[in-house]
Amino acid sequence: MKEELHRLNCFVENKPGVLARIVGLFSGRGYNIQSLSVGPTEDGSVSRMKIDVLGDDRVIRQIILQLRNQVNVIEVTSRRKNS
Amino acid sequence: MKTKQQVTGAQALVDSLAKAGTEVLFGYPGGAVLDIFNCLPDAPFQFVLGRHEQGSVHMADGYARATGKVGVCLVTSGPGATNTVTGLATANMDGVPLVCITGQVTMSQIGTDAFQEADTTGITRAVSKHNFLVHSADELPEIVAEAFYIATHGKPGPVVIDIPKNVQQALTVATYPERVSLRAYHPESFATSAQMARLAKLINEAERPVIYAGGGVIASGAAKDVAALAHRAQIPVATTLMGLGAFDERDPLALRLAGMHGNAAANYAINHTDLLIALGVRFSDRVTGKLAAYAKKAKIVHVDCDPASIGKNVRVSLGIVADVKDVLTTVSSRVKAADHSNWLAQIEEWRRKRPMAYKPMHKNVIMPQQVIEAIDKATKGEAVLVTDVGQHQMWAAQYFRHNRPRRFLTSGGMGTMGFGIPAAIGAALGRPDRKIVAICGDGGAQMTFEELVVAVEHKLPITFVVINNACLGMVRQWQELFYGKRYAGSILSVRGRPANERLEQDLKYDYLPDFVKLAQAHGADAVRVIDPVKLDGVIRKAVNSGRTTLVEVIVEPRANVYPMQPGGQPVEGMIFE
């Protein structure tokens, strides 16, 4: 399957350690994050992470499911990023 | 108005653990948890002192596997916490619910390289289901409640609570919450009625179905439902290592263990089935072998509570994210009775052609498989069997007739040597009504042998059987089969080592340590068996003695585990001798 750039939008609880937990999911499995930004949402207790990662559909699907399994992750969406 | 009573964070923790249902707390003290230990003499639960933190976590793990309850353990900061890593990883891989409390240096010291400081949440993140660093005593009861909830909901797993010393000392009025509500974690069953209908239809239409049951069946308490489905539609049942006990192996429909060291009939059946009904499994590489060739004629149905496990390793026709028991209860009424007699006859032929069997290699030398059979005979199918990791673990999986859930406790995913002795102690404390037999190799037994005193102190009637082949048998087997018989680092006896590992030939002992003396030094009864004729009698006497007993069995050192489907090979690559 073809590797493509995907943008994951990850809404997480705004708590210490959550960023490390999310990033650890990628690094621990050998996936390289191309770009990452974290910012507040209107609800101060929720942060939004924008994560760009390269992978085929199967890998991306697996990452999303693993992210959703995390206790602090509220929702994850993804889309292909057109280059 | 009555004012709420202030207590220390340490007391609030102990009260919360009691509220959460803790009956036994395993652990080891140290500077950063002295405030908590100070509350323990008045706690309404038992405290069991291990001799190494890894042992304490494995004890909590064995307790949890044997009882289905949460195992709880308490250790200090720094080395206490880092010593739990192997235990946590073991529980994490096998989905065992644990709550592990670690002490931490005071908040103001964190990040200063203080004495016995370690970044415990950082270190344990990858080996636990979740972890917490507690910032205030006020949030402690709620975090304990959340930890127990997370440990037991969805796929179970270990949860770490790291508590700085000043939080333990601070005063709070917070009490244990009535209910837990987590904002972002809602593991749910998503099975739709359309999925149920599809599953029933697939089962009703299948000609050569196989049920493939894993640890998830045991975790969800669905063993009876699996048996009901199997009997109704006459579907043979294979199990994973973690699933042993989920289906009674004395049943004619039992295919028993599948996978790398599984029964030929089980692996052939999976290879020829047209419908693989996978329940509470994760398609480990130790089961599938070469993925592209795995169950290649089959539609695969995968039911598991972990959404991330579905479609991870194999492509499935129908994936259902749900509790196995929920699914089986709903679907069973829609499944028609069937007989599948041709299919079952084919399986019987495979069984006849390739039975699980071994031959003695030398006269008057005990074969390790014989030891497992002797334990099975002596305990009459009523024991909880705990294993360590290696060849003996596979023989225990193959030659014991597993018949009920939570009776075979083994480190499956992580393959942790040293698991056996402490896990058996935890199991014995959780199930005092059961006979507990721990089987270890001579390698793994030496990794956590110090825990034996805990069994003696608590007068636990555990039989520890050390199957001694004077080598690290599974490593030696792979070296024999795949690495040109170069036995580097795997031979524990004087003879048979490579030249640069050679010991003096006139060393007083060929085998070290002397396990009988070692066990006696720990206060246990101990006996050694060398003569095959005496094996049954010694094992029977030990398991019926009601005392902590170690039986060292000197076995054939060159015995290998067969059959074997080497890693990454298809089922045709199975070797039998």
Image (cartoon, coloured by chain):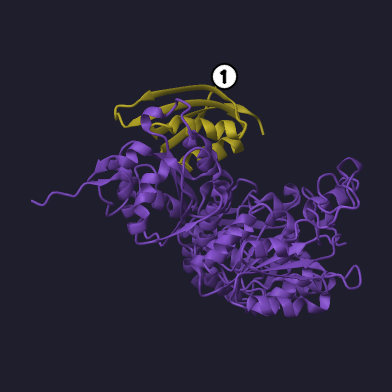
Taking B127 as reference, is B555 above or below it? Answer: below
Amino acid, disc 1: Ser
Residue B29, image x and y in percent? Answer: 46, 48
Residue B208 vertical position relative to residue A68 in the rendered view, above or below: below
Q: Which residue is drawn at 73% across and 75% down?
A: B374
Camera-nearest residue between B142 and B38 = B38
> Is residue B53 or residue B95 the one in the foreground?
B53
Chain of the residue under label 1:
A
Identify the image quadrant of the C terminus of chain B: bottom right
- Relative depth, front residue between B535 and B494: B494
In the depicted view, which residue is nearer to us: B75 or B250?
Answer: B75
Residue drawn at x 64%, y 47% is B313
Q: In this view, does B205 lie to the left or right of B533?
A: left
Q: Is mark 1 on a helix, strand or loop?
A: loop
Q: Can residue B75 be seen in this view?
A: yes
Q: Mark 1 points at which residue?
A: A83
Number of numbered discs on residues: 1
In the figure, is residue B324 to the left or right of B347? left
In this image, B297 relative to B497: left or right? Answer: left
Residue B183, image x and y in percent?
34, 42
Residue at figure coordinates x 45%, y 61% from the top left: B69
Task: Give percent across and percent down for residue B159.
Answer: 46, 47
Would you say residue B274 is visible in this rendering? no
Q: Provide residue A3's location: percent of width, then percent of height.
A: 64, 29
Q: Which residue lies furthest to the left in this view?
A: B1
Question: Chain A is which colour?
Answer: yellow
Quadrant in the rendering for residue B184: top left
Is B210 on the left or on the right of B492, as rendered? Answer: left
Chain seen in purple: B
